Amino acid sequence: MSAARSLYIPFALWLIASGISLYGHTQEAQSRSSKSASMGIMGDTADVKTTVKGGVALIGGGGAVNNAYKWMIERSGGGDVVVITASGNDGYGKDLFKLGGMNSVEILDITSRESADNDTVAGIIRKAEMLFLAGGDQSRYMRFWRGTKTLEAINYLLNVKKAPVGGTSAGCAVLGYLYYSGEKGSAVSAETLADPYNENVTIYRNDLLQPPFLQNVITDQHYLARKREGRHVGFLARIITDWAVLPKGIAADERTAVCIDDKGTAKVFGESKAYFIITDKNKKPELCEKGKPLSWYAKGKALKVYEIQGSDTGCGSFSLPDFNQASASGGNWFWWYVQNGELKKTQWQ
Protein backbone atom coordinates (compact mmCIF):
# COMPACT_ATOMS: atom_id res chain seq x y z
CA MET A 1 0.00 0.00 0.00
CA SER A 2 1.38 3.42 -0.97
CA ALA A 3 1.99 6.14 1.62
CA ALA A 4 -0.56 8.32 -0.12
CA ARG A 5 -3.16 5.54 0.06
CA SER A 6 -2.45 4.89 3.75
CA LEU A 7 -2.94 8.58 4.47
CA TYR A 8 -6.20 8.69 2.42
CA ILE A 9 -7.99 6.00 4.46
CA PRO A 10 -7.71 7.77 7.86
CA PHE A 11 -8.73 11.03 6.14
CA ALA A 12 -11.79 9.37 4.61
CA LEU A 13 -12.73 7.87 7.97
CA TRP A 14 -12.39 11.32 9.54
CA LEU A 15 -14.71 12.77 6.88
CA ILE A 16 -17.32 10.11 7.55
CA ALA A 17 -17.05 10.58 11.29
CA SER A 18 -17.52 14.31 10.73
CA GLY A 19 -20.66 13.70 8.69
CA ILE A 20 -19.14 14.70 5.33
CA SER A 21 -19.28 12.51 2.23
CA LEU A 22 -16.56 12.32 -0.40
CA TYR A 23 -19.04 13.81 -2.90
CA GLY A 24 -19.56 17.12 -1.13
CA HIS A 25 -22.84 16.34 0.69
CA THR A 26 -23.19 15.79 4.40
CA GLN A 27 -24.31 12.44 5.74
CA GLU A 28 -27.21 14.34 7.28
CA ALA A 29 -28.39 15.32 3.80
CA GLN A 30 -28.00 11.76 2.55
CA SER A 31 -29.97 10.28 5.47
CA ARG A 32 -32.61 12.97 5.04
CA SER A 33 -32.97 11.88 1.42
CA SER A 34 -33.31 8.19 2.29
CA LYS A 35 -36.14 8.98 4.71
CA SER A 36 -37.94 11.38 2.39
CA ALA A 37 -38.33 9.37 -0.83
CA SER A 38 -35.70 11.66 -2.35
CA MET A 39 -33.78 10.43 -5.38
CA GLY A 40 -31.10 13.02 -4.69
CA ILE A 41 -30.31 16.71 -4.99
CA MET A 42 -28.60 18.35 -7.95
CA GLY A 43 -26.94 21.64 -7.12
CA ASP A 44 -26.57 23.35 -3.76
CA THR A 45 -28.04 21.38 -0.85
CA ALA A 46 -28.43 24.55 1.24
CA ASP A 47 -31.99 25.89 1.37
CA VAL A 48 -32.43 29.33 -0.19
CA LYS A 49 -35.34 31.74 -0.10
CA THR A 50 -36.17 33.77 -3.18
CA THR A 51 -39.00 36.04 -4.27
CA VAL A 52 -41.49 33.98 -6.26
CA LYS A 53 -44.33 34.76 -8.65
CA GLY A 54 -47.28 32.44 -8.90
CA GLY A 55 -48.03 30.57 -12.08
CA VAL A 56 -49.28 27.25 -13.40
CA ALA A 57 -47.88 25.40 -16.43
CA LEU A 58 -50.14 22.82 -18.10
CA ILE A 59 -47.88 20.76 -20.36
CA GLY A 60 -49.24 18.26 -22.88
CA GLY A 61 -46.51 15.64 -22.63
CA GLY A 62 -44.69 13.92 -25.47
CA GLY A 63 -41.47 15.88 -25.00
CA ALA A 64 -39.90 18.82 -23.22
CA VAL A 65 -41.13 22.40 -23.63
CA ASN A 66 -37.96 24.15 -22.51
CA ASN A 67 -39.27 27.69 -22.81
CA ALA A 68 -42.20 26.82 -20.55
CA TYR A 69 -39.71 25.34 -18.06
CA LYS A 70 -37.68 28.56 -18.27
CA TRP A 71 -40.87 30.57 -17.68
CA MET A 72 -41.37 28.65 -14.43
CA ILE A 73 -37.70 28.93 -13.40
CA GLU A 74 -37.79 32.70 -13.88
CA ARG A 75 -40.91 32.93 -11.70
CA SER A 76 -39.13 30.86 -9.03
CA GLY A 77 -36.53 33.59 -8.60
CA GLY A 78 -33.81 31.00 -9.07
CA GLY A 79 -34.71 29.09 -5.94
CA ASP A 80 -34.99 25.40 -5.11
CA VAL A 81 -36.95 23.19 -7.48
CA VAL A 82 -38.74 19.99 -6.44
CA VAL A 83 -39.87 17.37 -8.97
CA ILE A 84 -42.44 14.77 -7.89
CA THR A 85 -42.76 11.41 -9.61
CA ALA A 86 -44.40 8.13 -8.68
CA SER A 87 -42.47 5.93 -11.08
CA GLY A 88 -38.80 6.42 -10.25
CA ASN A 89 -38.30 8.62 -13.31
CA ASP A 90 -35.52 11.15 -12.69
CA GLY A 91 -35.37 12.40 -16.28
CA TYR A 92 -37.53 15.48 -15.74
CA GLY A 93 -35.32 16.68 -12.90
CA LYS A 94 -32.16 16.21 -14.93
CA ASP A 95 -33.68 18.09 -17.88
CA LEU A 96 -34.65 21.00 -15.66
CA PHE A 97 -31.25 21.17 -13.99
CA LYS A 98 -29.49 21.33 -17.36
CA LEU A 99 -31.37 24.55 -18.14
CA GLY A 100 -29.73 26.28 -15.17
CA GLY A 101 -30.97 29.32 -13.33
CA MET A 102 -32.00 27.55 -10.12
CA ASN A 103 -30.26 26.82 -6.82
CA SER A 104 -31.05 23.10 -6.82
CA VAL A 105 -33.33 20.36 -8.08
CA GLU A 106 -34.54 17.58 -5.80
CA ILE A 107 -36.56 14.62 -7.08
CA LEU A 108 -39.11 12.98 -4.79
CA ASP A 109 -40.30 9.51 -5.80
CA ILE A 110 -43.52 9.23 -3.78
CA THR A 111 -44.80 5.68 -4.21
CA SER A 112 -47.06 5.18 -1.20
CA ARG A 113 -49.48 6.98 1.08
CA GLU A 114 -46.95 6.57 3.87
CA SER A 115 -44.38 8.56 1.89
CA ALA A 116 -46.98 11.15 0.94
CA ASP A 117 -47.93 11.63 4.61
CA ASN A 118 -44.32 11.96 5.76
CA ASP A 119 -43.42 15.22 7.51
CA THR A 120 -40.02 15.40 5.84
CA VAL A 121 -41.52 14.96 2.38
CA ALA A 122 -44.10 17.67 3.04
CA GLY A 123 -41.41 19.95 4.43
CA ILE A 124 -39.26 19.62 1.31
CA ILE A 125 -42.23 20.51 -0.88
CA ARG A 126 -43.20 23.51 1.26
CA LYS A 127 -39.67 24.94 1.06
CA ALA A 128 -39.58 24.74 -2.75
CA GLU A 129 -39.69 27.84 -4.91
CA MET A 130 -40.92 25.77 -7.87
CA LEU A 131 -42.68 22.41 -8.17
CA PHE A 132 -42.92 20.16 -11.21
CA LEU A 133 -45.20 17.11 -11.45
CA ALA A 134 -43.79 14.42 -13.72
CA GLY A 135 -45.72 12.32 -16.21
CA GLY A 136 -46.69 8.71 -15.61
CA ASP A 137 -49.99 7.55 -14.14
CA GLN A 138 -52.22 10.17 -12.55
CA SER A 139 -54.24 7.56 -10.68
CA ARG A 140 -51.12 6.95 -8.56
CA TYR A 141 -51.01 10.63 -7.65
CA MET A 142 -54.69 10.47 -6.74
CA ARG A 143 -54.34 7.33 -4.60
CA PHE A 144 -51.15 8.40 -2.86
CA TRP A 145 -51.90 12.09 -2.22
CA ARG A 146 -55.54 12.44 -1.20
CA GLY A 147 -55.86 13.39 2.47
CA THR A 148 -52.08 13.56 3.04
CA LYS A 149 -49.49 16.14 4.01
CA THR A 150 -48.10 16.07 0.47
CA LEU A 151 -51.44 17.29 -0.87
CA GLU A 152 -51.58 20.02 1.77
CA ALA A 153 -48.03 21.07 0.89
CA ILE A 154 -48.71 21.32 -2.85
CA ASN A 155 -51.86 23.35 -2.27
CA TYR A 156 -49.83 25.55 0.09
CA LEU A 157 -47.38 26.28 -2.74
CA LEU A 158 -50.24 27.03 -5.13
CA ASN A 159 -52.35 29.26 -2.91
CA VAL A 160 -50.31 30.60 0.02
CA LYS A 161 -46.66 30.75 -1.01
CA LYS A 162 -47.79 31.29 -4.63
CA ALA A 163 -44.81 29.53 -6.18
CA PRO A 164 -44.93 28.33 -9.81
CA VAL A 165 -46.27 24.79 -10.21
CA GLY A 166 -46.35 22.83 -13.44
CA GLY A 167 -47.02 19.34 -14.66
CA THR A 168 -46.70 17.31 -17.83
CA SER A 169 -49.01 14.56 -19.06
CA ALA A 170 -50.21 12.83 -15.85
CA GLY A 171 -48.86 15.77 -13.86
CA CYS A 172 -51.00 18.10 -15.96
CA ALA A 173 -54.05 15.83 -15.63
CA VAL A 174 -54.33 16.53 -11.89
CA LEU A 175 -53.89 20.30 -12.19
CA GLY A 176 -57.56 21.19 -12.00
CA TYR A 177 -60.35 21.05 -9.44
CA LEU A 178 -61.92 18.53 -11.83
CA TYR A 179 -59.74 15.71 -13.12
CA TYR A 180 -59.79 12.43 -15.01
CA SER A 181 -58.00 9.67 -13.09
CA GLY A 182 -57.44 6.95 -15.70
CA GLU A 183 -57.54 4.38 -12.92
CA LYS A 184 -59.41 1.70 -14.89
CA GLY A 185 -57.73 2.22 -18.23
CA SER A 186 -57.27 4.95 -20.79
CA ALA A 187 -60.49 6.51 -22.03
CA VAL A 188 -60.44 7.02 -25.80
CA SER A 189 -62.60 9.39 -27.82
CA ALA A 190 -64.61 6.86 -29.83
CA GLU A 191 -65.63 4.82 -26.78
CA THR A 192 -66.35 7.91 -24.67
CA LEU A 193 -68.57 9.47 -27.31
CA ALA A 194 -70.33 6.15 -27.90
CA ASP A 195 -70.99 5.80 -24.15
CA PRO A 196 -69.92 8.61 -21.79
CA TYR A 197 -70.54 6.21 -18.89
CA ASN A 198 -68.18 3.46 -20.02
CA GLU A 199 -66.01 2.14 -17.21
CA ASN A 200 -62.85 4.00 -18.26
CA VAL A 201 -64.44 7.43 -17.78
CA THR A 202 -63.51 8.10 -14.15
CA ILE A 203 -63.83 11.75 -13.14
CA TYR A 204 -63.43 13.40 -9.74
CA ARG A 205 -63.86 16.90 -8.35
CA ASN A 206 -62.64 19.07 -5.50
CA ASP A 207 -60.65 16.40 -3.64
CA LEU A 208 -57.10 16.92 -4.93
CA LEU A 209 -55.25 20.02 -6.18
CA GLN A 210 -56.71 23.52 -6.10
CA PRO A 211 -54.75 25.66 -8.57
CA PRO A 212 -55.69 29.34 -8.87
CA PHE A 213 -58.11 30.12 -11.73
CA LEU A 214 -58.77 26.44 -12.45
CA GLN A 215 -62.02 25.99 -10.52
CA ASN A 216 -64.43 23.91 -12.61
CA VAL A 217 -61.66 23.26 -15.18
CA ILE A 218 -60.74 19.79 -16.42
CA THR A 219 -57.52 19.45 -18.42
CA ASP A 220 -56.41 17.02 -21.09
CA GLN A 221 -53.07 16.23 -22.71
CA HIS A 222 -51.49 14.59 -25.79
CA TYR A 223 -54.51 16.22 -27.36
CA LEU A 224 -54.18 16.10 -31.13
CA ALA A 225 -51.50 13.40 -31.17
CA ARG A 226 -53.87 10.93 -29.50
CA LYS A 227 -57.12 12.43 -30.86
CA ARG A 228 -58.48 13.18 -27.39
CA GLU A 229 -60.87 16.01 -28.25
CA GLY A 230 -63.86 13.64 -28.22
CA ARG A 231 -63.12 12.15 -24.82
CA HIS A 232 -62.58 15.63 -23.37
CA VAL A 233 -66.02 16.67 -24.63
CA GLY A 234 -67.41 13.49 -23.09
CA PHE A 235 -65.86 14.43 -19.75
CA LEU A 236 -67.52 17.85 -19.91
CA ALA A 237 -70.89 16.28 -20.74
CA ARG A 238 -70.62 13.92 -17.76
CA ILE A 239 -69.74 16.76 -15.39
CA ILE A 240 -72.76 18.80 -16.45
CA THR A 241 -75.09 15.79 -16.28
CA ASP A 242 -73.85 14.28 -13.01
CA TRP A 243 -73.07 17.34 -10.92
CA ALA A 244 -74.97 20.24 -12.51
CA VAL A 245 -71.63 22.05 -12.71
CA LEU A 246 -70.81 24.26 -15.69
CA PRO A 247 -67.27 23.08 -16.51
CA LYS A 248 -64.53 24.47 -18.71
CA GLY A 249 -61.78 22.65 -20.57
CA ILE A 250 -58.12 23.42 -21.18
CA ALA A 251 -56.01 21.07 -23.28
CA ALA A 252 -52.48 21.05 -24.68
CA ASP A 253 -51.12 18.93 -27.47
CA GLU A 254 -47.72 17.23 -27.20
CA ARG A 255 -44.62 19.42 -26.79
CA THR A 256 -46.96 22.30 -25.98
CA ALA A 257 -47.70 24.17 -22.74
CA VAL A 258 -50.37 26.53 -21.44
CA CYS A 259 -48.65 28.88 -19.00
CA ILE A 260 -50.97 30.83 -16.67
CA ASP A 261 -49.54 33.79 -14.78
CA ASP A 262 -50.51 35.14 -11.36
CA LYS A 263 -53.23 37.32 -12.94
CA GLY A 264 -54.83 34.34 -14.65
CA THR A 265 -53.68 35.21 -18.17
CA ALA A 266 -52.60 32.24 -20.27
CA LYS A 267 -50.27 32.03 -23.23
CA VAL A 268 -49.11 29.03 -25.21
CA PHE A 269 -45.53 27.83 -25.62
CA GLY A 270 -44.32 25.04 -27.86
CA GLU A 271 -44.67 23.35 -31.21
CA SER A 272 -48.38 22.57 -31.45
CA LYS A 273 -51.75 23.89 -30.24
CA ALA A 274 -53.75 24.41 -27.07
CA TYR A 275 -57.51 24.66 -26.58
CA PHE A 276 -59.86 26.53 -24.26
CA ILE A 277 -63.40 25.09 -24.20
CA ILE A 278 -66.41 27.10 -23.00
CA THR A 279 -69.71 25.49 -22.05
CA ASP A 280 -73.06 27.31 -21.90
CA LYS A 281 -75.72 26.84 -19.22
CA ASN A 282 -78.36 27.14 -21.95
CA LYS A 283 -76.75 24.46 -24.13
CA LYS A 284 -76.59 21.29 -22.09
CA PRO A 285 -76.20 17.85 -23.69
CA GLU A 286 -79.44 16.61 -25.24
CA LEU A 287 -78.54 12.99 -24.46
CA CYS A 288 -75.93 11.82 -21.99
CA GLU A 289 -76.92 8.40 -20.68
CA LYS A 290 -75.24 5.11 -19.93
CA GLY A 291 -74.95 2.84 -22.95
CA LYS A 292 -76.07 5.50 -25.45
CA PRO A 293 -74.13 7.74 -27.86
CA LEU A 294 -73.64 11.29 -26.69
CA SER A 295 -75.74 13.98 -28.33
CA TRP A 296 -74.71 17.60 -27.75
CA TYR A 297 -75.83 19.53 -30.81
CA ALA A 298 -77.43 22.89 -29.90
CA LYS A 299 -77.90 23.66 -33.60
CA GLY A 300 -74.20 23.11 -34.25
CA LYS A 301 -73.09 25.52 -31.51
CA ALA A 302 -72.83 23.39 -28.38
CA LEU A 303 -69.30 24.34 -27.34
CA LYS A 304 -67.29 27.47 -28.01
CA VAL A 305 -63.61 26.57 -28.45
CA TYR A 306 -60.55 28.82 -28.76
CA GLU A 307 -57.45 27.39 -30.45
CA ILE A 308 -54.00 28.96 -30.01
CA GLN A 309 -50.90 27.85 -31.88
CA GLY A 310 -47.87 27.81 -29.58
CA SER A 311 -44.52 29.48 -30.19
CA ASP A 312 -41.07 29.61 -28.63
CA THR A 313 -41.79 32.94 -26.96
CA GLY A 314 -45.40 32.23 -25.96
CA CYS A 315 -48.32 33.00 -28.24
CA GLY A 316 -51.82 34.36 -27.78
CA SER A 317 -53.68 35.41 -24.68
CA PHE A 318 -56.65 33.98 -22.82
CA SER A 319 -57.96 35.31 -19.51
CA LEU A 320 -59.08 32.52 -17.19
CA PRO A 321 -61.00 34.77 -14.76
CA ASP A 322 -63.20 35.84 -17.70
CA PHE A 323 -63.04 32.66 -19.80
CA ASN A 324 -65.00 34.19 -22.65
CA GLN A 325 -64.69 35.50 -26.18
CA ALA A 326 -63.73 39.03 -25.19
CA SER A 327 -60.64 37.86 -23.30
CA ALA A 328 -59.03 35.96 -26.18
CA SER A 329 -56.46 37.06 -28.75
CA GLY A 330 -53.94 35.48 -31.09
CA GLY A 331 -55.99 32.41 -32.00
CA ASN A 332 -59.10 31.14 -33.76
CA TRP A 333 -62.64 30.36 -32.60
CA PHE A 334 -64.51 27.16 -33.40
CA TRP A 335 -67.89 25.61 -32.65
CA TRP A 336 -67.73 21.98 -31.54
CA TYR A 337 -70.79 19.75 -31.30
CA VAL A 338 -71.69 16.05 -31.11
CA GLN A 339 -74.32 14.20 -33.15
CA ASN A 340 -75.00 10.55 -32.42
CA GLY A 341 -71.57 10.03 -30.87
CA GLU A 342 -69.59 11.88 -33.55
CA LEU A 343 -67.66 15.07 -32.78
CA LYS A 344 -67.82 17.80 -35.41
CA LYS A 345 -66.14 21.21 -35.70
CA THR A 346 -66.79 24.43 -37.59
CA GLN A 347 -64.69 27.59 -37.57
CA TRP A 348 -66.21 31.01 -36.96
CA GLN A 349 -65.14 34.57 -36.38
Image: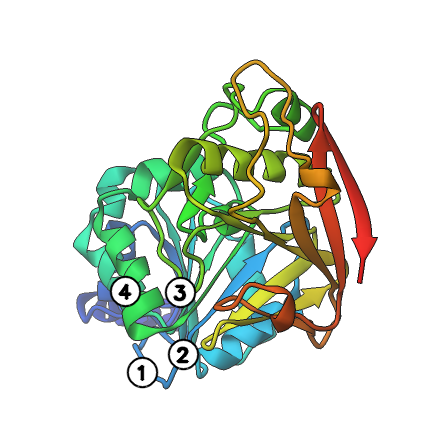
Q: Mark 1 points at which residue?
A: 49
> First in sequence: mark 4 or mark 1?
1
**240, above or below 18, in the image:** above
Task: Name the residue: 37% across, 86% down.
Answer: 51
Task: Name the residue: 42% across, 75% down.
Answer: 54
Q: Which amino acid does label 3 sit on?
A: Pro
Q: Circle 3 — which element?
A: loop
Image quarter where the C terminus lies is bottom right
The circle drawn on residue 79 is: 2
Q: In this view, does 338 lie to the left or right of 136?
A: right
> First in sequence: mark 3 or mark 1?
1
> First in sequence: mark 2 or mark 3?
2
Q: Name the residue under label 3.
A: 212
Percent across and percent down for residue 292 are 60, 16
The colour mode here is rainbow
Q: Is residue 30 left or right of residue 129?
A: left
Q: Which amino acid does label 1 sit on?
A: Lys
User: Which of the two residues, 173 or 283, is positioned nearer the viewer here?
Assistant: 283
Q: Circle 2 — which element?
A: loop
Q: How many labels does the image show?
A: 4
